[in-house]
Image: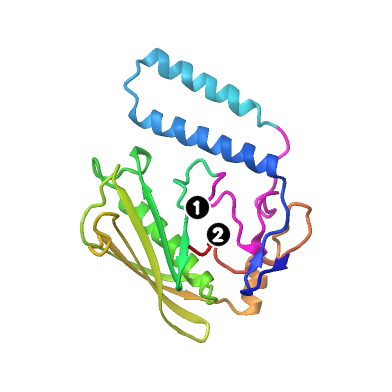
Amino acid sequence: MTTSADGHGTSEPYDTDLMAASTDLAAALREIIELSTTTEAGTDAIRAAAELVRRAAGELDGPRRPLTQMPRLDDPQARRRTFNPVAGVASGIAPPLDFRRSNGVVTAEAALGAPYEGPPTFLHGGMSALFLDQVLGDTAAINGVWGMTARLELDYRGPVPLGRLLVFRGWLQETQGRKSVIAGSIALAETPDRPLVEARGIFVMPRPEKMASYFGSVTDSSGEHRMPGNAGDATAVPEK
């Protein structure tokens, strides 16, 4: 890993063709997941689609990495998590959210569809928690106070509509020793200062012995042990 002028890790080279193919696969998966939740096609068409998906899955049959081995495209030292379920560009279940940072504040915008639905036409409350945990974790990481989520509190001010552009935000409130308090929100992009969901998280940097206990068996794709650069699942967050 190399280090940039601002002290943040930069990623090791990776297979750009593999990244492009994995990103394309994720886009196709998102499309089929969205269609599967909104289609009004008949039973025969749905069964035919299910068979096509199973046949496509057969193309990926073969050796698989164990959960203790990082994917080939990931670089934990540089916080590149390609299959992160919120921000991973190669994850079929991620929107994905594209985070940016400015003056220590993390922001992202996205319009979410039917796969994330809870009450009809609104975002599932658990999804709000998932997205905000990621936002707050990234905020901690880019402020140099990364940690693992010890507590996450959410206040639901109003339902979050699907199909409308949303803005996600995170900012550092305070830090003391190994503990940091991060706040965040979800709002409509057109009214960013009127949060629909507010969050407050406490992130704690594990002691070295805990880090070793949690991640001692994790290896990179070659099988070599590499302790993560941070304990969270934060992805690289560029400056605006």
| Residue 202 sits above or below residue 45 on the image | below
| Residue 101 sits above or below residue 117 on the image | below
Residue at x 26% of width, y 51% of height: 160
Q: Quadrant of residue 38?
A: top left
In percent of width and height, residue 154 lies at 31, 65
Q: Which residues are magenta?
A: 62-90
Q: Is residue 124 magenta?
A: no
* Residue found farthest to the bottom: 177
The answer to which of marks 2 and 1 sits earlier in the sequence is 1
Q: Please state which amino acid type lies under the numbered disc 1.
A: Ala
Q: What's the distance in space between the residues labelled 2 and 1, CA to CA? A: 7 Å
Residue at x 72% of width, y 66% of height: 2
Q: Please state which amino acid type lies under the numbered disc 2.
A: Thr
Residue hosting label 1: 87
Residue hosting label 2: 235
In percent of width and height, residue 159 lies at 22, 52
Q: Secondary structure at mark 1?
A: loop
Q: Secondary structure at mark 2?
A: loop
Closer to us: 198 or 150: 198
Q: Is residue 63 magenta?
A: yes
Q: Quadrant of residue 234?
A: bottom right
Residue at x 54% of width, y 62% of height: 238
Q: Residues within 10 Å of mark 1 (few under 14, many from 20)?
A: many
Position of 92 with respect to 63 (left or right) is left
Q: Residues within 10 Å of mark 2 (few under 14, many from 20)?
A: many
In percent of width and height, residue 22 lies at 61, 39
In percent of width and height, residue 200 lies at 35, 71
Q: Magenta stretch: dominant SS?
A: loop
| Residue 199 sits above or below residue 87 on the image | below
